[in-house]
Image (spheres, rainbow, N blue to C red):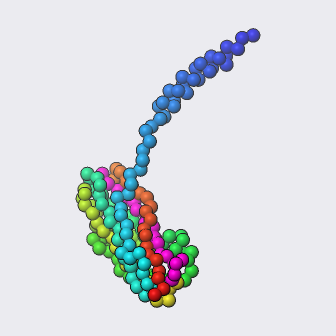
Amino acid sequence: MRRTHPIRAALVACPALVVGLLLSAAPARADSPLPLTAVSDKQTTVRGGEFTLTLTLTNPYDTPIQFVYQSVQETYQTSLQTGLKFTATACGTQTNGCSDNVHGGIARYNVPLAPGASSTFTVTYAIAPDSACGDAARIDFYSYLYYEYNGGLNNNSGIIGVPGTQVACA
């Protein structure tokens, strides 16, 4: 007895498999990096002092950015540190301000943001005089950013780390 059916099935399946793989292959697409920079004005802040986070969004596209959602929240590591006491005291430049809950709140940028233009969002934090301090006391943040451009047909989003400050005792 000859085994023609399995051989025929293999001969039909192999070209179909190759064509399917070729049609499904797509060039790798790297997500666009977020056009956001984030800095703290002080690497170290003493208890009772203040530091300011500055986040700058720059439109790298040839169409306006027309919608922006951004939040700033403390990192999980910062939330685990007992005794750290800090509050947001001021918010916004070149924005419509912040939500009522600045600590984890939303920056409301003026939109549309023209091609090549930048807008800066700042939040100032005060560290309580009785806050924990020392080598292990560090306040860091992250920002989630989502924005739409090209008439809402395109969008980008992601999370960026925002360096905060080391809390010094004296």
Is residue 69 visible in the rendered image? The answer is yes
User: Closest to the observer: 166 or 60?
Assistant: 166
The residue nearer to you, when weighing 60 against 105, is 60
Q: Horizontally, is 167 left or right of 123 in the view?
A: right
Q: Residue at x 41, y 57 (%)?
A: 157
Give the left or right position of residue 114, taking residue 141 as reference.
Answer: left
Please state the horizontal and vertical placement of residue 150, each as a whole percent of the image: 30, 51
**Coordinates of residue 8 in the picture (x, y in percent):** 62, 16
Question: For the point 30% across and 71% down, which residue is it?
Answer: 95
Q: Compared with residue 111, is residue 152 higher up or lower down, i.e. above or below?
A: above
Q: Main secondary structure of the magenta part?
A: strand
Range of magenta residues: 133-151
> Is residue 137 shown in magenta?
yes
Of all residues, the one furthest to the bottom in this rendering is 129
90 w.r.t. 2: above or below: below
- On screen, 62 above or below 124? above
Q: Residue at x 36, y 75 (%)?
A: 41
Left or right position of 5 against 39: right
